[in-house]
């Protein structure tokens, strides 16, 4: 058990380097199952979810070696795979559902434990299921498992009700070796989807429309294993950008693509920050108290829900009031009760939050309820007067490799505290 103790007040100054995106690498690892042989992924973040996905792939028959110093994962995929993803692993990580498409494509069947809900909401699978059914799969739910069977997936035209990241990925991975043409309309177009599509193209898949909301896939018979560099983590990048603004500091984020964060960086500029964009990095600096900014979360290229708690933390100490609208995950405002312990004034009503900026916050014990809520609380703790102790930090470690050490290098006063209970 570990908690983090932060003494607020330091101005963060310096450089941080990003590794690959959690929400990309987990899917890239699943996509590796599509091709027998050795796939090597680089810029892999050293986070627990990568280990859990590694264990899942191992259970399915692959051999996975994670070389942490080299930031690389090698996955050796056999000709024959097991097709069952058990509850004990799936319950630890919702992204386990990403093996559904590849297993169906490779084995003609997949049994995946239902991931269930989590702290940010219920998260349905109806679009994954409806899309696979249109491609000829028979899908049922029995004894807590989603069971899908399709001896040969067939290309089809699929209109998603909503540009779901997970459903777009599942259908894309199922379509690449399906018979004929698949069109996925109203597809998600997050940079992580572009990354997985690009990797599958490298593997021999035929996909057009990458980065747009209409993906067209011509099925091919076989795919080859590849070496692929994971796209860098735009949400970690955005979190550092807010850290610079909230502490009135100056942080350069290296290996970052500002074009993946356009709206978020624009919001920081509106709040009063200076944003300098370079080829593969950007610098955010701030020399006054920020101004409150309204935000509305939407699928990419809209404002990312995964940066909403960090911006609520920023608004909590900004000048004026702001309205934050959350359109993706109904329970993502739960963390404002924790933020209130630090003195934040946030009133929620359905999917809206009214944040009235305070001149300051005061340190207190708080609990991270999920990865991004945890990041928001760290940011608030950095500016709160006195000591903020963050509990349940294992949530933060799932998405931010070495965050404490990065914060220390930037000048924050923060320590990991280990407890025996
Ligand atoms: N939804 C359905 N039915 C479906 C699929 C989705 O109702 O069949 C709903 C969900 O319940 C949710 C919304 O659609 O309300 C968005 O779901 P989406 O499928 O787009 O998200 P996801 O694939 O479950 C990924 C990221 C999330 C990120 C969202 C949105 C991974 C592992 N997770 O989730 O990341 O917030 O996209 O960008 O890629 C995080 O990193 O903290 C995180 C939660």
Image: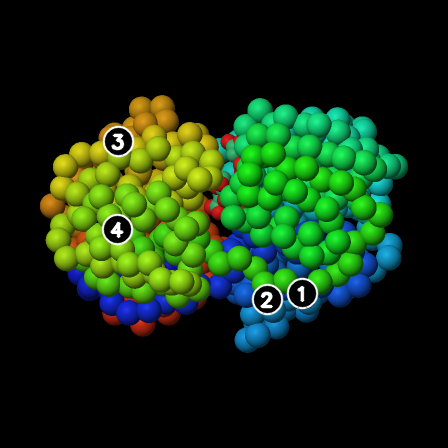
Q: CA distance from mark 2 to mark 3?
A: 39 Å
Q: Which mark is residue 227?
A: 1
Q: Which residue is mark 3?
A: 323
User: Which label's residue is closer to the chain start, 2 or 1?
Assistant: 2
Task: Give me the C-alpha separation between circle 3 and circle 4.
Answer: 18 Å
Q: Which residue is mark 2?
A: 42
Categorize mark 4 by other alpha carbons within 10 Å: few (<14), some (14-19), many (20+): many
Residue 354 location, quadrant: top left
Identify whether 365 is placed above or below 252: above
Contact (Cβ within 8 Å) of mark 3 with mark 4: no
For label 4, the SS is helix
Q: Quadrant of the N terminus?
A: bottom left
Residue 127 % position (x, y): 63, 29
Q: What is the spatial separation of the Cα atoms under label 4 and label 1, in whole angstroms?
A: 39 Å
Q: Say which mark, if any, is on residue 240.
A: none
> Which is more foreground, mark 4 or mark 1?
1
Q: Residue at x 71, y 40 (%)?
A: 217
Q: Which residue is mark 4?
A: 380
Q: Look at the numbered disc 1 and give the secondary structure of its residue.
A: strand
The image position of residue 225, as x and y in percent, is 75, 61
């Amino acid at each position: 058990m570990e908690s983090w103790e932060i003494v607020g007040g330091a101005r963060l100054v310096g450089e941080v380097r990003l590794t690959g995106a959690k929400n990309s690498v987990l899917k890239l690892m699943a996509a590796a199952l599509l091709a027998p042989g050795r796939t090597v992924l680089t810029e892999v973040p050293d986070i627990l979810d990568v280990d859990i996905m590694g264990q899942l792939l191992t259970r399915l028959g692959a051999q996975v070696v994670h070389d942490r110093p080299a930031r690389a994962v090698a996955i050796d995929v056999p000709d024959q795979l097991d097709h069952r993803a058990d509850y004990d692993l799936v319950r630890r990580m919702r992204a386990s559902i990403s093996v559904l498409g590849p297993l169906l494509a490779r084995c003609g069947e997949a049994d995946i434990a239902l991931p269930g809900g989590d702290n940010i909401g219920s998260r349905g699978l109806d679009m994954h299921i409806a899309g696979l059914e249109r491609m000829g799969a028979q899908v049922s739910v029995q004894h807590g498992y989603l069971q899908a069977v399709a001896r040969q997936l067939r290309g089809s035209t699929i209109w998603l009700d909503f540009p779901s990241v997970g459903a777009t990925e599942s259908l894309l991975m199922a379509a690449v070796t399906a018979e004929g043409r698949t069109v996925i309309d109203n597809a998600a177009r997050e940079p992580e989807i572009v990354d997985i599509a690009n990797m599958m193209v490298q593997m021999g898949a035929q996909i057009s429309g990458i980065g747009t909301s209409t993906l067209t896939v011509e099925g091919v018979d076989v795919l080859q294993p590849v070496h692929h560099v994971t796209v860098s983590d735009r949400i970690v990048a955005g979190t550092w950008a807010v850290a610079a603004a909230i502490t009135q500091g100056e942080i350069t984020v290296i290996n970052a693509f500002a074009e993946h964060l356009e709206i978020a960086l624009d919001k920081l500029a509106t709040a009063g920050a200076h944003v300098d964009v370079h080829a593969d990095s950007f610098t955010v600096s701030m020399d006054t108290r920020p101004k409150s900014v309204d935000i509305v979360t939407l699928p990419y290229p809209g404002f990312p829900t995964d940066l909403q708690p960090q911006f609520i933390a920023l608004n909590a100490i900004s000048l004026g009031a702001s309205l934050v609208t959350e359109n993706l995950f109904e329970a993502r405002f739960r963390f404002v009760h924790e933020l209130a312990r630090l003195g934040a004034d946030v009133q929620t009503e359905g999917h809206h939050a009214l944040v009235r900026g305070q001149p300051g916050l005061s340190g207190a014990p708080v609990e991270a309820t999920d990865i991004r809520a945890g990041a928001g609380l760290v940011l608030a703790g950095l500016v709160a007067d006195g000591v903020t102790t963050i509990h349940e930090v294992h949530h933060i470690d799932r998405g931010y490799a070495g965050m404490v050490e990065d914060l220390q290098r930037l000048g924050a006063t923060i320590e990991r505290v280990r407890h025996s209970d």
